[in-house]
Image: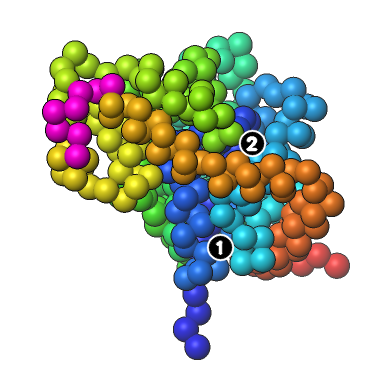
Amino acid sequence: METKKTIFSGIQPTAVFTLGNFLGAIKNWGALQDSFDCVYSIVDMHAITVRQDAAKLREQTLKSYALTMACGIDPEKSALFIQSHNPHHAEMNWILSCNTQFGELSRMTQFKDKSEKHPDDINAGLFTYPVLMAGDILLYQADLVPIGIDQKQHLELARNVAERFNFRYGDFFTVPEPYIGETGAKIMSLQDPTKKMSKSDDNPNASVYILDDRNSIINKFKRAVTDSETEVRFDAEKKPGISNLMTIFSACTGKSFDEIEKTFSGHGYGDFKSAVGETVADCLKPIQDKYNSFIKDRDYLKNCYTEGLKKAMKISGKTLSKAYRKVGFVDKP
Ligand code: TYM
């Protein structure tokens, strides 16, 4: 029997997921579940690299778990767990930290961006964040990692760390490949289409959140920043706003850019923006309905994350104890 390849991915529970998180990553997580062994995590340990209110983080982590299920991750098919519940992540983090160079971490653009955003709290965790992320992936010997483009540099670092470890200690880690979807891998802000759409944007009109109500979604698209032309045409350089809306429309409907251009030829931006808003609202409605029923049933959620943890730890435990042997630690009594 052919063994299935393994997938790992994670998402931070810092806020309700955005349309970018959904189209760039989670939509693909769901689609991969039948053909691969999938392990997915709500990465709360990553979230505390930026100051969080403890009560809010706890609640947001449970909400994120329910939202991930509502987005189509089936806890029966995949191992869906909360990162801080599995101590192997912190343990692997140490081994990999000793196999990661200061210089390579210094080149991470997300570290530079986040340091600029939080100049009063440039903590060591923010700097070593990509090592924790490498451990998340390598613990499950993942072949593929579905992510948006913004995580590509971190994935590249995980590959380098895996290769370095394999070189030093003998072939051990699977070197993971990124899995980046064709459309939607970088959804841009609706207010500044040169910036990616982000959970932490201060401008509420910049990001569409998966749980936004229909009217807010439609209004956010109506207010989306575009250019002074009127033609719905894809040109990421010259027309980043309209191109972003076309990408969103294409990712939600499966229509090509050519088809979209033909459909909206001669219509102007107003009609197109309304159509994108309506389409996104329709696409998110079933997710919102499922979320509302999952979040009410805390016992069911607990049962799911407990089972998910068991499945995850079975795999990560094996990898960790082999890694401990490789580096020369005495077997645990
Ligand atoms: P996070 O929580 O910022 O985002 C989760 C996923 O959503 C993707 N994404 C986007 N895709 C398209 N357009 C956007 N505007 C957009 N914004 C976010 C991200 O690329 C990501 O795939 N470090 C990770 C979490 C993580 C992880 C891991 C991911 C921790 N360990 C191991 C993969 C494997 C992060 O902060 O993602």
Q: Is residue 251 left or right of residue 301?
A: left
| Residue 135 visible in the current orientation | no
Region in magenta: 263-270
Query: Which residue shows up at 14% across the image and 33% down it?
Result: 265
Counting from the top left corner in percent of width and height, residue 159 is at 43, 52
Question: Which SS class for mark 1?
Answer: strand
Q: Is mark 2 within 8 Å of ligand 1?
A: no
Q: Secondary structure at mark 2?
A: loop
| Front residue (pair 164, 131) | 131
Q: Which residue is at a point 77% across and 34% down the rendered structure image? A: 58
Q: Amino acid at mark 2?
A: Pro
Up-down relation of residue 125 to residue 95 (above or below): above
Q: Are marks 2 and 1 in contact (CB under 8 Å)?
A: no
Dot 2 or dot 1, earlier in sequence? 2
The outermost residue toward the top is: 120
Q: Is residue 262 within the magenta segment? A: no
Q: Nearer the viewer, residue 108 or 63?
A: 63
Q: Give residue 280's position: percent from left, percent from top.
A: 43, 37
Instruction: Report the number of discs.
Output: 2
Q: Is residue 97 left or right of residue 152?
A: right
Q: Which mark is residue 165?
A: none
User: Is the CB atom of the residue marked by disc 1 within 8 angstroms of ligand 1's nearest atom?
Assistant: no
Q: Which residue matches tag 1? A: 38
Density class for disc 2 (Cα within 10 Å; few <14, some 14-19, many ≥20) is many
Give amino acid for label 1.
Cys
| Residue lying at 68% horizontally and 22% vertically, measured from the top left | 51
Residue located beneath label 2 in the image: 13
Whether residue 208 is visible to the viewer of this picture, yes or no, is: yes
Where is residue 231, by image quadrant? top left
